[in-house]
Amino acid sequence: MKKKIILNSILIIGIFIFVYYTFSLITERRELLSKNYNFAIGKVTSFEVGAKVSPWLAYEFEVNSKRYYGTYSIDYNKIKNPNTYVNKYFLVKYSTVKPKYNEINLNSPITNKGNRISLDTTPPLPHE
């Protein structure tokens, strides 16, 4: 009986620690992307489908000559043909403190018109 109580207590504490840690990471990411951020040009590198997860687009971008990677979960109700995004460039918002926290904006395609790069839509203004 005592062993069962101890095992249940350990399990409950373990679950609590996991939930707290996950919530802390989500909060940190949200905060850093809302206060300390910049923009970079990112390239969608692939469209992937997992067995038990939502399909996603993989992308990469560079900050200070270091390459970072991200993923974007696909909602088929919003994106009918995800393959059309592969090998295209988009605006990526990243944390200047931890660039591993980033998000791609598929509504902001980047095009190369001649020798200059042009943003086809206006990015949101930085928060003050």
Image (cartoon, grey):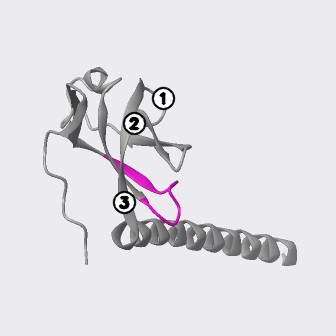
Please tell me whether mark 1 sits on a helix, a strand or a loop.
loop
Residue 124 position within the rendered picture, expressed as x and y whole percent measured from the top left: 18, 59
Residue at 20% from the left image edge and 27% from the top image edge: 80
Q: Hey, which quadrant is residue 21 in on the image?
A: bottom right
On screen, residue 33 above or below 61: below
- Using the image as rendered, state which of residue 20 and residue 68 is in the foreground: 68
**Distance in Å between CA atoms under marks 3 and 2:** 28 Å
Element type where label 3 sits in the image: strand
Amino acid type, mark 2? Ser
Please tell me whether mark 3 or mark 2 is closer to you in this view: 3
- Is 72 rendered above or below residue 113? below
Please, what is the three-letter code of the amino acid marked with disc 1? Gly
Residue at which label 2 appears: 54
Q: Nearer the viewer, residue 22 or 32?
A: 32
Q: Earlier in the sequence, mark 1 or mark 3?
A: 3
Marks 1 and 3, how far apart at CA: 31 Å
Front position in the image: 76 or 127? 127
x%, y% of residue 56?
A: 39, 34
**Residue under numbered circle 1:** 50
Q: Does the segment drawn in magenta span residue 96?
A: yes
Q: Is residue 86 visible?
A: yes
Could you say which quadrant of the image residue 35 lies in? bottom left
Disc 1 to disc 2: CB gap under 8 Å: yes
* Secondary element type, mark 2: loop
Question: Can see residue 56?
Answer: no
Image quarter in which the C terminus is found: bottom left
Q: Which residue is mark 3?
A: 38
Up-down: is 6 above or below 73? below
**Residue type at numbered disc 3:** Asn
